[in-house]
Amino acid sequence: MKATEINIIEEVELENPIFIEALPGIGHVGKLAADSMIDELDATKFAEIYSPYFPPQVFVGEDGVIENMINELYYLKDIGEDKQDFILLVGNTQGLSTEGQFEICKDILDYLKKFDIKTMYTLGGIATGQPVENHKVLGAASDSKMAEYLKEHDIELRSNDGGIIGASGLFLGLGQRLNISGACLMGETPGYFIDAESAEAILIKLSNLLNIEVDTGKLDERAEETRKMLEKAQQMEQEMMGKSTSQDVDDLRYIG
């Protein structure tokens, strides 16, 4: 495999879908929130994404069956009061290198052009390094109109407060160049464990923005499943890379 592959499972027709990205990152809060949307709203997977830029490994499950490094695209049709369509990007990994991040995000957006996406939300965490009592959701937008929309929903905007690393930032920036109005929602989290409470805070805010309803009752269960997956991934990465892992890879491993 020399390039990212997008394998289409089902050809779908969608009307002005909103794109939601939620790949693994800080506290896995974005991933947990999107996985809940997929399960609770019964989304359908329509594409699988494989890339040589993913970590060179597989997971081995409790039943001895492997799981590939993969990103997946799901769709939802006629959801909520607005009868809105959605495309969700989830998975168990992000690109391992800076070059890989750009290539994967660009390839996915190139594929999604045919759906004529006008709006996107990326989901992630923002690490506080200490316990969080009230999980605040912060936002950043690609344009002033979206920034105002976030403020109308009581989402505090980040200002002169560093960058957004990884897919959550890249999709927002690349989307801006394609005139896609976007926002990144970042849940405050200590950053050193799988944070279901932060994921719930993000999901509540996202549901309000999208005018939909999503049950958050199973987030704790999903957080435990994700914790086991992350522990396996960390162990395998340590075995492969040892203590000499470059700072570039370290910075990209836990990203928004």
Image (cartoon, helix red, strand yellow):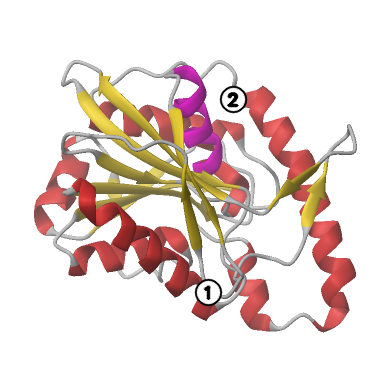
Q: Is residue 8 left or right of residue 159?
A: right
Asked whether disc 2 touches disc 1, contact meaning CB atoms under 8 Å apart, the reply is: no
Main SS, magenta residues:
helix
Number of residues whose C-alpha sits closer than 10 Å to that of mark 2, classed few (under 14), some (14–19) or many (20 or more): many
Three-letter amino acid code of the residue under disc 1: Gly
172 vs 151: above or below: below
Residues 34 and 208: in front is 34
Tell me if residue 163 can be seen: yes
Three-letter amino acid code of the residue under disc 2: Leu
Write down the quadrant of residue 221 in the picture.
top right
The numbered mark at residue 100 is 1
Residue 148: percent from left, percent from top:
13, 47
Write down the quadrant of residue 194 in the picture.
top right
* Mark 2 residue element: helix
Q: CA distance from mark 2 to mark 1?
A: 30 Å
Q: How many marks?
A: 2
Q: Is residue 139 left or right of residue 126?
A: left
Q: Is residue 140 left or right of residue 54?
A: left
Q: What residue lies at 63% left-to-right and 56% top-to-bottom? A: 129
Q: Which residue in the protein does label 2 denote?
A: 219
Residues 47 and 177: in front is 47
Residues 195 and 253: in front is 253
Q: What residue lies at 84% left-to-right and 39% top-to-bottom? A: 65
Number of residues whose C-alpha sits closer than 10 Å to that of mark 1, classed few (under 14), some (14–19) or many (20 or more): some
Write down the quadrant of residue 32 in the picture.
top right
Disc number lying in front (2 or 1): 1
Mark 2 and mark 1 lie on one chain; the one further toward the N terminus is 1
| Magenta region, residue range | 30-40
